[in-house]
Amino acid sequence: MARHKSRPVEEQGEPEMEISSMIDCCFLLLIYFLVATSLVSEKKLDVNIPGNPSAGGTPPPVEPGRIDVSANGAITWNGDMPVGEPYDASAQPGTAAYKAQRHLDQLVEALKTLKEQAVAVDTEPIVMVTGAPSTPHQRIVDVMAALAEADIHTVGLNTTASE
């Protein structure tokens, strides 16, 4: 029979966990995220939140102007004020009648008034030009010249479906 040597058995205490390397990793991650978030630059967004305007708030915006050019070349301002007679294609260049129908004095005055109202509330004036599909192109050019004379640059063009 074989002899067995008996070794004394060491008594084991509570099991231990080495967490020093895990703490080092956590600190490195913490430092990484702190540095990474400070590199991102935030931009300021100017946002007006709807609500009750205070007494010193901004005034209401100016209503956009509306120029309607009919198929015969007649021009109305904001739907009810005639500012241009029907277009006469037979008028000869250089004549007084030609110059009178091409330069729209009443429309220019109405546009300048709109510009003054918009400047008073610190906005750009907006004008919508609506014409029939058979409107003479020269009449639209006359309207655009009046807009340029009044120094209005925000313009929309539209055509009506029917005449």
Image (spheres, rainbow, N blue to C red):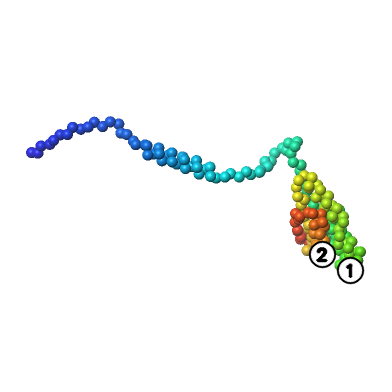
Q: Secondary structure at mark 1?
A: loop
Dot 2: few (<14), some (14–19), or many (≥20) neighbours within 10 Å? few
Question: Disc 1 marks which amino acid?
Answer: Gln
- Of label 1 and label 2, which has the lower sequence position? 1
Question: Disc 2 marks which amino acid?
Answer: Gln
The residue under the point 75% across, 37% down is 56
Q: Is residue 27 above or below residue 129?
A: above
Locate residue 120, reporting x and y percent.
79, 45
Circle on res. 92: 1
Q: What is the residue that sits farthest to the left in this orientation?
A: 1
Residue that label 2 marks = 138
Location of residue 130 by image quarter: bottom right
Locate residue 61, reporting x and y percent.
76, 45
Label total for image: 2
Q: Is residue 14 above or below residue 30?
A: above
Locate residue 103, reporting x and y percent.
86, 60
Query: Quarter holding the N terminus?
Result: top left
**Could you tell me if residue 82 is visible in this image?**
no
**Could you tell me if residue 18 is visible in this image?**
yes
Query: Quarter holding the C terminus?
Result: bottom right
Q: Is residue 5 left or right of residue 116?
A: left
Q: Is residue 39 left or right of residue 68?
A: left
43 or 128: which is nearer to us? 43
The residue under the point 61% across, 45% down is 43
Locate residue 45, reporting x and y percent.
63, 44
Q: Is residue 52 left or right of residue 85?
A: left
Circle on res. 36: none
The residue under the point 87% across, 56% down is 105
Spatial CA distance of label 1 from label 2 is 14 Å
Q: Is residue 120 left or right of residue 99?
A: left
